[in-house]
Amino acid sequence: MPLLHLILLAIIQGATEFLPISSSAHLILLPELTGMEDQGLVLDVAVHVGTLFAVILYFRRDVALAAKGLLSLVQFRLDTPGAFLALCLIIATIPVMIVGLALKLFGLTDLLRSTAVIGWTMLGFGVLLWIADRGPAEGRTANRWTMKHAAILGLWQALALIPGTSRSGICITGARFLGYSRDGAARIAMLMSIPTIIASGALLATDITADAALARDAAIAALFAFVSALAALRIMMWLLQSVSFTPYVIYRIVLGIALLAIAYG
């Protein structure tokens, strides 16, 4: 694959994975709207790996805490903050794994990959994010996460399997409705992405029939996805100190309307 295409693919995936504007939608639309070659599963997995390393690096303290807690969990101990965080992340990941596996087994995944579906989800869930972000928040922080909220946000996250929804966007929406601050909602959404990206990457990898020639392309794509994802994370978390999610909502609404015009025009 041409180097420019690889870089463009990686930057789009990296920049949109953690912003509430849907990375899957942009990856689907890239070949549909530009006529470029579809990147295929190998590169899909590669860019997911790049974004995974970015979020792990950015939230390394939380990740280390959860990793240590996981060791306690396997010993059936829930006596540390890390163990509780790890348990909440597991609870929040179960719904998306079940729904994702069901969609794959029944062959429904490809049916949702259309410009019209993406247009409606970009528009509808963009408005929903705006409503959630405008509502009164209790200022709940990520440290006050509960197992009940983890289960609820896990159900919200399962909606992200519909292209155009945005995994981070729908989790932030759900967290804002539950009273979390903007920073707290974003932090929880980003931490939830780690086991989800691992699970989705593993699911994609089961269908890979790669040859050695793709290894270089995959490495390049993963590297650029890592860099762009890390930059996007830093910018968003910094902006949330003074800016709401409204700019992302406006982007989603404009793009959604444009896509619906294309789909039905």
Image: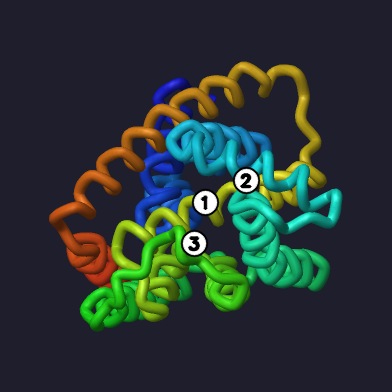
The image position of residue 230, as x and y in percent, is 39, 34
Q: Residues within 10 Å of mark 3 (few under 14, many from 20)?
A: many
Q: Which residue does the numbered mark 2 point to in the structure image?
A: 66
Q: Amino acid at mark 1?
A: Leu
Secondary structure of the residue carrying tag 1 is helix
Residue 111 visible, this orientation = yes
The image position of residue 80, as x and y in percent, is 65, 52
Is residue 65 shown above or below 115?
Answer: above
Marks 1/3: CA–CA distance: 12 Å
Marks 2/1: CA–CA distance: 10 Å
Quarter occupied by residue 253:
bottom left
Q: Earlier in the sequence, mark 2 or mark 3?
A: 2
Q: Which quarter of the rendered picture does the N terminus lie within?
A: top right
Give the residue displayed 44% in from the left and 26% down from the top: 224
Q: Earlier in the sequence, mark 2 or mark 1?
A: 2
Secondary structure of the residue carrying tag 3 is helix
Q: Which residue does the numbered mark 1 point to in the structure image?
A: 191
